Image: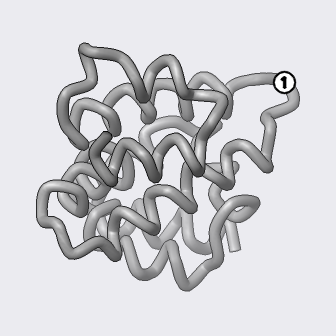
Amino acid sequence: MSRWRRKASDFLPEQQSLIASKLVDSPMMLWVELQWEFRKLCELEHPPIEHLSRFWNYCDWCLLNSDDDIRTAAALGFCEQLLSSDAMAKILPKIMKRSDFLDIRSLLEYHNTPEEVDRWLLELW
């Protein structure tokens, strides 16, 4: 089993069927699928914060990884999308630190203007 898949299983055992799927053949494909799961969980009436925190923890592990494919997948497949719905954005201060948000600012600005990111920063923290 690849290291990225094994780490995903460690961080997100609830997503094991997705992580182990034969259709998930790369870190990017995994993050595309995880991002959809993250979005669905954020939209629940009572989002499972501890579970959602582990999505961020796995993402953080990926962003610090030495493998370009793993880092890029987390950045493009997950981070860039974090402000794409109000429900996801409003979860962020519950699962990450303000400094984490600032660290991924350039990724957030891919789909948002700097002013939109500033607005979220002020609103959330």
> Total number of numbered labels?
1
Residue 41: quarter of image: top right
Q: Is residue 96 left or right of residue 71?
A: right
Location of residue 88 in the rendering, given as x and y in whole percent from the top left corner: 58, 42
Image quarter hosting the N terminus: top left
Tag 1 secondary structure: loop
Amino acid at pointer 1: Glu
Location of residue 51 in the rendering, given as x and y in whole percent from the top left corner: 72, 43
Q: Is residue 98 left or right of residue 5?
A: right
Image quarter hosting the C terminus: bottom right
- Which residue of the protein is positioned furthest toward the right in this rendering? 46
**Relative vertical location of residue 35 with respect to residue 11 in this rendering, above or below:** above
Q: Is residue 48 left or right of residue 74?
A: right
At horizontal 52% and vertical 77% (from top left) the residue drawn is: 100
Residue nearest the viewer, comparing 40 with 23: 23
Circle 1 residues within 10 Å: few <14, some 14–19, many ≥20: few
Location of residue 48 in the rendering, given as x and y in whole percent from the top left corner: 80, 37
- Which residue of the protein is positioned furthest toward the front in this rendering? 1
At horizontal 34% and vertical 39% (from top left) the residue drawn is: 31
- Which residue of the protein is positioned furthest toward the bottom in this rendering? 99
At horizontal 43% and vertical 39% (from top left) the residue drawn is: 84
Residue denoted by label 1:
45
